[in-house]
Image (cartoon, grey):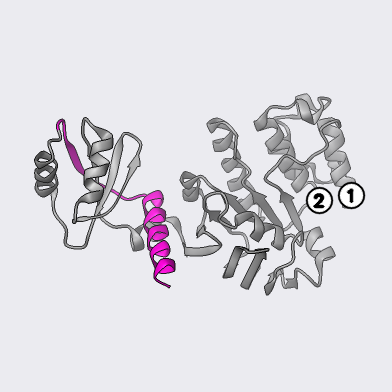
Amino acid sequence: MIRFNNVSKSYGDVQAVSDISFEVKEHELFGLIGPDGAGKTTLLRMLVSLLLPDFGSISLAGCNVVGNYRKVRSLVGYMPGRFSLYQDLSVEENLSFFASVFGSSIAENYHLIEPIYKQIEPFRKRRAGKLSGGMKQKLALSCALIHKPVVLVLDEPTTGVDAVSRHEFWDMLDNLKKAGITIIVSTPYMDEASRCDRVALIQQGCILSIDTPGSIVQTHGKQHWNIKARERYKLITDLEAWEQTASVYPFGQYLHLKLKSGGAGRNEIIAYLKRNNHEQIEACEGTPGIEDVFIDLMTENDKKQIEA
């Protein structure tokens, strides 16, 4: 359905996207996962023909995005990162406007947006600028869907939205996927990766890994330890200085410690910390998550770039 082929894009001296290739299958929910500045927005803007790639090609439903931008835009429902609807128009007026742009109407495709729109329909006369964050999100999604697109492109749709609205939004995406819509969504939230069929972990314009969330963890996940002691700052300093440490970083109330291959076990960890005068030590084996894998892959990528 979507294909990026050796795509690169720079802004002056800043390389936003570097030789990226991947495919999104039909009826798939695909996630671009990475921090701010990773290149996610640039990729999505090129996909919807708002930006042109410097090198490479992008196709959607068999159409070259650059050469067939009018057709591509008719096939795509796009929800940018910032709320971009008309703040002074009401909910209903915004929806009617976007439907008319594509020669449609609210009545014609109401069945597609009904599960989403019915939650904000009681406020259809309210100006869009007066809506809460979660309601703005639902209105923007409704406007992106009102012309019945085959592909839904969402750029960080849950940023700045409360946890309940985030959960509801992903439930909506699951239902849209079941309805036959292909979805590509970007997010900086690692916990949202598990809601996708496949994900691409992206950092500094490069893809670190592409697979199902479970396979990425299984393939790249390495043993790590959850470590805690009374003096947190001294704990991380001493673990960073230990020759057995491959990486260590804060994660909630614990530190996540990854040891070098063939490294020490629990007894050796505790003995080392006691030699450095730590008290109230907790050390238990942890199961790596997508966040741990991303940090490991990012660290490895940074080392490769420095060596190059």
The residue at which mark 1 appears reads as 101
Distance of label 1 from label 2 (alpha carbons): 9 Å
Q: Camera-side residue: 63 or 175?
A: 63
Location of residue 230 in the rendering, given as x and y in whole percent from the top left corner? 21, 30
| Quarter of the figure that contains the N terminus | bottom right
Say which element carries label 2.
Answer: loop
Say which element carries label 1.
Answer: helix
Q: Camera-side residue: 55 or 74?
A: 55
* Majority secondary structure in the magenta region: helix
Q: Are marks 1 and 2 in contact (CB under 8 Å)?
A: yes
The residue at which mark 2 appears reads as 147
Location of residue 218 in the rendering, given as x and y in whole percent from the top left corner? 34, 59
Location of residue 45 in the rendering, given as x and y in whole percent from the top left corner? 70, 58
Please say if 228 is above or below 34.
above
Quarter of the image holding residue 6? bottom right
Q: Label 1: how many residues lie within 10 Å, few (<14), some (14-19) or many (20+)?
A: few
**Residue type at numbered disc 2:** His
* Residue 99 within the magenta-colored segment of the rendering: no
